[in-house]
């Protein structure tokens, strides 16, 4: 009894013939049938060139015409086969012999030989790809199952791919329309499964396929406000263009609050001033020449009192260095409660709107 493990294995059946009778026999013929799942792959005789051998591709029968078989004479036919469907195993070959003489012991005129299938898990190789395209075929680079049916299956989670993305069992895939963010790489993992009869084997994997980003993440089609009256447009290809709108620039509100202490002196921070002690608080504005205004641009600043004025305190706005506020060296903030005052500068002096 022989053994095979996978498709492509070769096996040779050995069919012996001997005349055990008391008389020579003529027109001796041996007929053997190739089992399903096997392919006829040739023959030989021992000794060589005994009779003639033919094969019928329809009936899968091998016919060995020996002719004369003398008393005590023995020959051997070797039938070569190849496994083409391992799932059909075990494989049994049956051969019968006949001749002109009447055989009183016909029970030994039939020969059988069985080939079993060993328990051997299939193998395969999943390689993955670190720089794949949107579409491809995993079977082009991976090692398919050495026997059984090869299937490619997704394993694990998808990265930057919609949940509806999938791969075909033959290894083909197409990620067109499934990438969520084209400026980020996308990837998926898969394994190779081998199907042998009713059994399934995950023989290799998981392996990862990565689709590189289509665009550099820094190249976004966006417009950025430069806060100086200009805007910068950066196209997807990285080309940048600055647009000068020659417009007024508005800064965030600055507040004068008569209930807390001064905590900041930056132009863009809130001024928190407490004048409840009856003294006059002076807020010094930055020199307009230090604001970095573009030519022909102005900057406006709004001061807002958010609670009641406390007398006899007060608040003065000044600049210093000879810079004027609306023609004067300082400006008294009006004593009325919840008053708003807006100033603007052209980079030289301040003016009250």
Image (cartoon, rainbow, N blue to C red):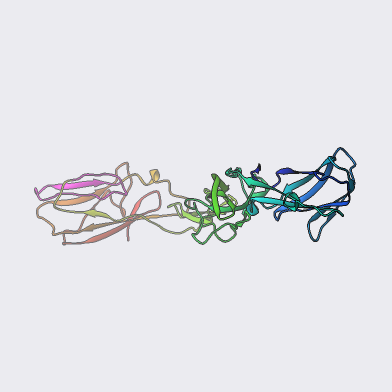
Image quadrant holding the N terminus, namely top right
Identify the residue at horizontal 78%, vertical 50% (top origin).
40
Majority secondary structure of magenta residues: loop
Q: Nearer the viewer, residue 231 or 202?
A: 202
Quarter assignment of residue 308: bottom left
The x and y percentages for residue 342 are 30, 59
Identify the residue at horizontal 63%, vertical 55% (top origin).
170
The x and y percentages for residue 304 are 23, 58
Identify the residue at horizontal 57%, vertical 47% (top origin).
209
The x and y percentages for residue 237 are 60, 51
In the figure, is residue 130 to the left or right of 95? left
Question: Is residue 221 visible in the rendered structure shown here?
Answer: yes
Q: Nearer the viewer, residue 73 or 173?
A: 73
In the figure, is residue 69 to the left or right of 141? right
Q: Nearer the viewer, residue 106 or 321?
A: 106
Question: Is residue 219 visible in the rendered structure shown here?
Answer: no
Please state the total of marks drawn on the protein image.
Answer: 0
The x and y percentages for residue 322 are 32, 43
Rendered position, 6 above or below 352: above
Determine if the magenta segment contains residue 248.
no
In the figure, is residue 6 to the left or right of 182? right
Image quadrant holding the C terminus, namely bottom left
Question: From which residue to which does the magenta span run?
Answer: 262-285
In the figure, is residue 280 to the left or right of 269? left
Q: Nearer the viewer, residue 193 or 298?
A: 193
């Amino acid at each position: 009894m022989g053994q095979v493990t996978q498709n492509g294995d070769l096996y040779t059946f050995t069919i012996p013939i001997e005349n055990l009778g008391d008389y020579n026999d003529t027109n001796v013929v041996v007929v053997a049938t190739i089992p399903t799942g096997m392919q006829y792959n040739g023959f030989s005789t021992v000794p060589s060139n005994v009779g003639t051998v033919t094969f019928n591709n329809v009936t899968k029968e091998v016919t060995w015409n020996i002719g004369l078989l003398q008393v005590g004479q023995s020959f051997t036919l070797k039938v070569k086969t190849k496994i083409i469907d391992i799932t059909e195993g075990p494989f049994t070959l049956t051969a019968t012999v006949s001749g002109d003489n009447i055989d009183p012991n016909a029970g030994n005129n039939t020969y059988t030989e069985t080939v079993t299938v060993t328990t051997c898990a299939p193998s395969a190789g999943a390689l993955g790809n670190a720089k794949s395209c949107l579409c491809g075929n995993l079977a082009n680079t991976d090692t398919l199952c050495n026997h059984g049916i090869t299937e490619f299956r997704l394993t694990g989670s998808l990265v930057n791919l919609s949940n509806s993305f999938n791969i075909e069992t033959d290894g083909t895939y197409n990620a067109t329309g499934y990438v969520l963010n084209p400026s980020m790489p996308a990837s998926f993992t898969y394994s190779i499964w081998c199907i042998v009869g009713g059994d399934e084997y995950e023989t290799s994997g998981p392996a990862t396929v990565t689709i590189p980003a289509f665009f550099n993440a820094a190249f976004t089609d966006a417009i950025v406000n430069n806060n100086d009256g200009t805007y910068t447009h950066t196209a997807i290809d990285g080309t940048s263009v600055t647009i000068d709108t020659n417009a007024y620039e508005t800064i965030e509100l600055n507040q004068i609050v008569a209930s807390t202490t001064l905590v900041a002196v930056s132009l863009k921070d809130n001024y928190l001033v407490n004048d409840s002690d009856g003294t006059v608080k002076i807020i010094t504005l930055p020199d307009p020449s230090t604001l970095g205004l573009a030519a022909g641009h102005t900057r406006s600043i709004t001061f807002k009192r958010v609670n009641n004025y406390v007398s006899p305190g007060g608040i003065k706005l000044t600049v210093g260095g000879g810079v004027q506020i609306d023609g004067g060296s300082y400006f008294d903030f009006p004593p009325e409660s919840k008053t708003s005052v807006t100033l603007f500068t052209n980079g030289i002096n301040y003016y009250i709107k």
